[in-house]
Image: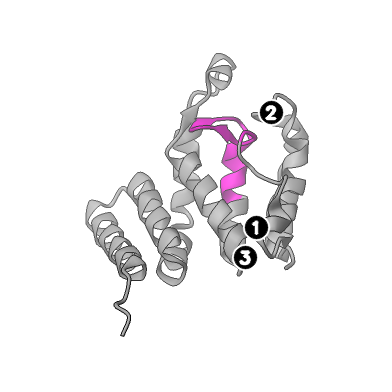
Amino acid sequence: MSVSALVHAELERHDWAALSCGCGESAEHVPLMFEAILTAGTPRDMIGYTLDNHLEIGTNLFEAAVPAVGVILAALAGDPSPPARRHLLDTLCHLVSGDSHAIEQAAGRTELGDECRRKAREGYWLIARTGLTGSADDAGTAADICEFIDLDDERSGYYQALLRERMSAKTKRRPRG
């Protein structure tokens, strides 16, 4: 697996060292985490590399979460490995369902959740495509993301139902015969 030129460009576009991270340090190491995740071919390759507790803790967001949404969308525009796609979708779901961590609120960054949702809307079709072409879990997570980010109730309801139907169809067991 490799990291696409689009992902590299999106990573290089931001001054990660100037952004706060959930681990208590600057987010300077976040691009390396993305690269490790995106080059992993198996879940085993990803051991020790996670975005959890860097961009968010639970759904309490840190400053690095906002540019990370763009990196995730750039990665989804390519063809990440199934474990990378799974991790990216789960992370994106946490980011769009979250709000600023108390530390960020104290620093005056109270709108991180809204900023993440706004950025994710830019990739609505990538998220829907990922859910419609990926695993049952991908479909369910994409439906959840659509619920959080889409302001168009009619479109959101339609795609959520379509994605949840796909999730159900892929998880039903077929009788042995």
What is the number of the mark on residue 80? 3
Location of residue 31 in the rendering, given as x and y in whole percent from the top left corner: 74, 46
The image shows a total of numbered marks equal to 3
Circle 3 packing at 10 Å, graded few (<14), some (14-19), many (20+), is many
The answer to whether residue 9 shows anywhere in this view is no
* Residue 40 in which image quadrant: bottom right
Q: In this view, does 114 lie to the left or right of 109?
A: left
Which amino acid type is marked by label 2? Cys
Location of residue 160 in the rendering, given as x and y in whole percent from the top left corner: 29, 58
SS class of the residue under badge 3? loop
Query: Does the magenta run of residues contain 60?
Result: yes
Location of residue 156 in the rendering, given as x and y in whole percent from the top left corner: 29, 55
Question: Toward the viewer: 154 or 49?
Answer: 49
Quadrant where the C terminus sits is bottom left
Which amino acid type is marked by label 1? Pro
Residue lying furthest top in this view? Answer: 106
Residue linked to disc 1: 43
> Which callout, 1 or 2, points at the residue further toward the start of the chain?
2
Which amino acid type is marked by label 3? Pro
> Which callout, 2 or 3, points at the residue further toward the start of the chain?
2
The answer to whether residue 89 shows anywhere in this view is yes
What is the number of the mark on residue 23? 2
SS class of the residue under badge 1? helix
115 up-or-down from 127: above or below: above
Location of residue 130 in the rendering, given as x and y in whole percent from the top left corner: 47, 65
* Residue 161 in which image quadrant: bottom left
Circle 1 packing at 10 Å, graded few (<14), some (14-19), many (20+), is some
> Which callout, 3 or 1, points at the residue further toward the start of the chain?
1
Residue lying furthest front in this view? Answer: 177
* Residue 162 in which image quadrant: bottom left
